[in-house]
Image (spheres, helix red, strand yellow):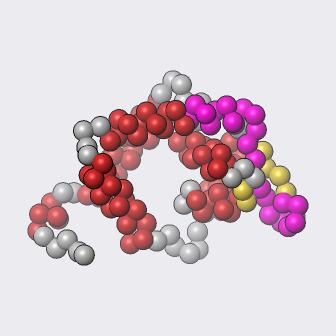
């Protein structure tokens, strides 16, 4: 179902989406209780569900290419949030594991995310949020990552 109404062209969706994303990222990074960047929090969330995930799988889940996930893991390891270990079955592959500090920070990141999600959804019905979530998810299908990343 396509929205071909003329009014749909006047919402400036690209602009609004980009400004909202930048504003939220900056606000989150400026919070004094945040020990991690939003990207690091994303990595911690993934490891909280599946500790010891392959780096490539973590990158795919975060919509990052090999260089991006490698840099994120390096920064997270330098902060002692994660550690990288060679895969036991494939010496070329690397797995990422939470450290004790990473587990502690993950707990705080979950609390922070719940508060941010509550603020983001305040004033909207569940049905409206379902539509927003469906629209945002559809962007990933309509504009897939290039296969060379």
Q: Identify which residue is drawn at 72% across, 56% down.
A: 53
Look at the image and say whether residue 89 sits in the magenta stretch: yes
Q: Give yes or no for residue 108 being in the magenta stretch.
A: yes
To which quarter of the image does residue 135 belong?
Answer: bottom left
Residue 145, percent from left and from top = 50, 69
Q: Is residue 35 left or right of residue 1?
A: right
Q: Is 126 located above or below residue 64 in the figure? A: above
Q: Is residue 7 left or right of residue 108?
A: left
**Quadrant of image for the N terminus:** bottom left
Q: On screen, 3 above or below 55?
A: below
The structure residue drawn at horizontal position 16% and vertical position 73%, both measured from the top left corner, is 4
Residue pictured at 23% horizontal, 74% vertical = 2
Q: Is residue 101 left or right of residue 13?
A: right
Q: Is residue 78 visible?
A: no
Q: Position of residue 108 (x, y in %)?
A: 58, 31
Pick whichever, 79 or 88, lies toward us: 88
Q: Residue furthest front?
A: 126
Q: Quadrant location of the C terminus?
A: bottom right
Image-quadrant location for residue 65: bottom right
Residue 112 percent location from the top left of the image: 49, 33
Image position, residue 144 (x, y; %): 46, 71
Number of marks in picture: 0
**Residue 115 appears in the figure:** yes
Residue at 88%, 61% in the rendered image: 88
Q: Is residue 125 above or below residue 145?
A: above
Q: Residue lying at the far left in this picture: please name it.
A: 6
Q: Which residues are magenta?
A: 87-109
């Amino acid at each position: 179902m396509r929205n071909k109404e003329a009014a749909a062209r006047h919402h400036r969706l690209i602009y609004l989406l980009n400004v909202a994303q930048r504003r939220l990222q900056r606000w989150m990074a400026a919070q004094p209780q945040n020990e991690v960047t939003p990207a690091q929090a994303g990595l911690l969330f993934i490891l909280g569900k599946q500790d010891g995930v392959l780096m490539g799988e973590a990158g795919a889940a975060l919509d990052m290419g090999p260089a991006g996930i490698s840099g994120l893991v390096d920064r997270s390891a330098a902060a002692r949030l994660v550690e990288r270990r060679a895969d036991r079955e494939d010496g070329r592959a690397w797995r990422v594991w939470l450290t004790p500090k990473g587990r502690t920070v993950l707990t705080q990141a979950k609390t922070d995310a719940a508060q941010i999600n509550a603020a983001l959804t305040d004033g909207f019905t569940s049905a409206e949020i379902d539509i927003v979530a469906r629209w945002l998810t559809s962007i990933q299908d309509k504009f897939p990552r290039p296969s060379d990343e």
